[in-house]
Image: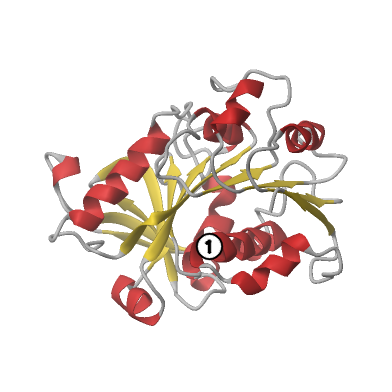
Amino acid sequence: MLRIFIATLCIMPYLCSAKIIDSKVLDNGGNGPFNAVVTSDSSLENYVIYRPKNLLTTVNSSSKLPVVVFANGGCMDTSYPFQNMLSNIASHGYLVIALGKMQYSLDDRQLNKASNAMIPKAIDWATAQTANPLSEFFQKLDLNKIAIAGQSCGGAQLLATATDRRVSSYLMFNSGIADMTMADANEQSLKNLHAPIIYLVGGPTDIATDNAKLDYQRINHVPIIFANHQTAGHSGTFEQPYGGSFSTLAIKWLDWQLKKNDSNASLFLSSQDTSFPHWDIKAKQF
């Protein structure tokens, strides 16, 4: 793990260009074509940014970066348990903004709840940075391709903020609301969805699987995928190198939905695809 500190001062963060103040590298930068780095930024306090290290090379080689905002399990202010997956997503040409400050271990600071308001705030920041000629992100983010994602309680935060019309895709990891009330979300929050959504759960030992199944039955107004890993459980494969198959499947979804890689559609829509043998995948409303 590489750790770097860069001194900086930004008195009015939202009006300042992005400046890296801390960074680390995971899994040698990910398995995608763009070496990823995990950063803290002076202009976005209380978040972690997962991004390709060389933005210009990435944009020139591919396209502007779609944006993914990630809310954590337990609605907590740390993405540490999911960092391998989030870094790997970034290595495939995405900017990922996760709620909560950088950590190097789960016990290096006190953990707190992250507010739902942090999700739209992250999108506000991305909007401001890509419009700022002094920012490294200037004209490098695709604001027409934004996803919000959440794991467990973070999925409830997703549902509570899903009305944001800037969002064009959703990812629910080990999460489902069913008949619960959590993070200001409940069954009625499913009506907030206005774009395609994927649920990724971990089989019978995942406490969220039954709730996700009920959500799948109830959502009849947007395209929806239900992807069920039969043995992963509630913690998924997030701590495996590159985030394991949860990461791989999420990237396939993002590439289809946000980068219009239609060759991935058959993975989600055809029962004949066997490239993810531990997963059962079904779809409706496509």
Q: Is residue 269 left or right of residue 142?
A: right
Disc 1 target residue = 89
- Residue at 35% across / 44% down in the picture? 123
Residue 116: give x, y in percent of width and height: 45, 28
The answer to whether residue 281 shows anywhere in this view is yes
- Residue at 66% across / 69% down in the picture? 264
Which residue type does callout 1 highlight? Ile
Q: Is residue 125 left or right of residue 65?
A: left
The C terminus: image quadrant: bottom right
Q: Residues within 10 Å of mark 1 (few under 14, many from 20)?
A: many
The answer to whether residue 19 shows anywhere in this view is no
Residue 220: give x, y in percent of width and height: 70, 37
- Residue at 49% across / 49% down in the picture? 168
Residue 113: give x, y in percent of width and height: 48, 26
Q: Nearer the viewer, residue 160 or 221?
A: 221
Q: Nearer the viewer, residue 258 or 14?
A: 258
